[in-house]
Image: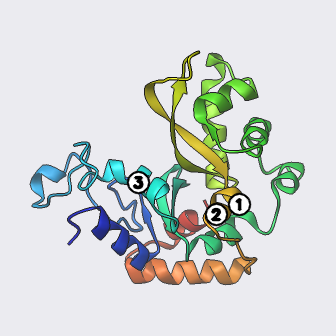
Amino acid sequence: MINNFSDFCAALLDCGFSMGGGNSKGIYAVIPYGWQEQAFIDTPVKWHTGDPETDPWEWRMRVLEERDDIAYSKLFFKTSGYITKEWYPLFYAVRRQGESFKEAYERGTVSRAAMRIYEVVASGETPLHDIKRIAGFSKEDKSQFDRAIVELQSGMFITMCGRAHKLNKYGEGYGWHSTVFATVEDFWRFRGVKLPKLDPQESYERIKERILLLNPAAEQKKADKFIRG
């Protein structure tokens, strides 16, 4: 039974990975219900209350800001998910196949819009609003930008690492928080982790075995998409 943030982290570290938003998508979610279903479930864990101890929406930033062993980003089915430090290298091996961003771009597996974004993030942690500005995306480019930012997360080139306010001319924060991104390598390096080089096929098989342990009813096609991104 998960009653708070600490319980959630313990459960996530035990299973290794999870969908992020209250829906297992046929694979697995530590919190398997969303805000629409929670009224019918007897639990203190409720979505969108703003309570950092019992609101899963708050936990996605808490794991990034308070822990060094859990990643959260748009990782699965173009939507959010968590992967722990133990399991991240396996997904990284499958998704990246040992390629650098430059190699992937030259091979044509990432878009030019993604390249513009990656070049900004590769220079250091950058909030979303600054990425748009520095990379030269206009309001008319919103759909292109949104696709590329998800493409980079799914491909494990960049990842969310926190949040930040926009700053006014006096250096004061204002408005809603903006998500901050880092390269995957920088994210883990700042947490004292160097991603090892693992065999992609062996990594794939280990993840698939884990999925079937967590959810024996998982369909092969969905599991494959979940693993490969």
Which element carries disc 1, helix, strand or loop? helix
Toward the viewer: 135 or 63?
Answer: 63
User: What whole-number distance in Å separates the C-alpha atoms at marks 2 and 3?
Assistant: 16 Å
The disc, 2 or 3, on the residue closer to the chain's N-terminal end is 3
Name the image quarter holding the C terminus.
Answer: bottom right
Which class describes the residues within 10 Å of circle 3: few (<14), some (14-19), or many (20+)? some
User: What whole-number distance in Å separates the C-alpha atoms at marks 3 and 1?
Assistant: 20 Å
Residue at the image point whose x is 51% and y is 84% from the top: 209
Which class describes the residues within 10 Å of circle 1: few (<14), some (14-19), or many (20+)? some
Residue at the image point whose x is 69% and y is 57% from the top: 186
Amino acid of disc 1: Glu
Q: Residue 185 carries which label?
A: 1
The disc, 3 or 1, on the residue closer to the chain's N-terminal end is 3
Q: Name the residue under label 2.
A: 188
Q: Name the residue under label 3.
A: 62
Tell me where residue 189 appears, x and y as whole percent: 68, 63
Q: Residue farthest to the front?
A: 170
Residue at the image point whose x is 60% and y is 82% from the top: 205
Q: Pointer 1 and pointer 2: residues touching (CB < 8 Å)?
A: yes
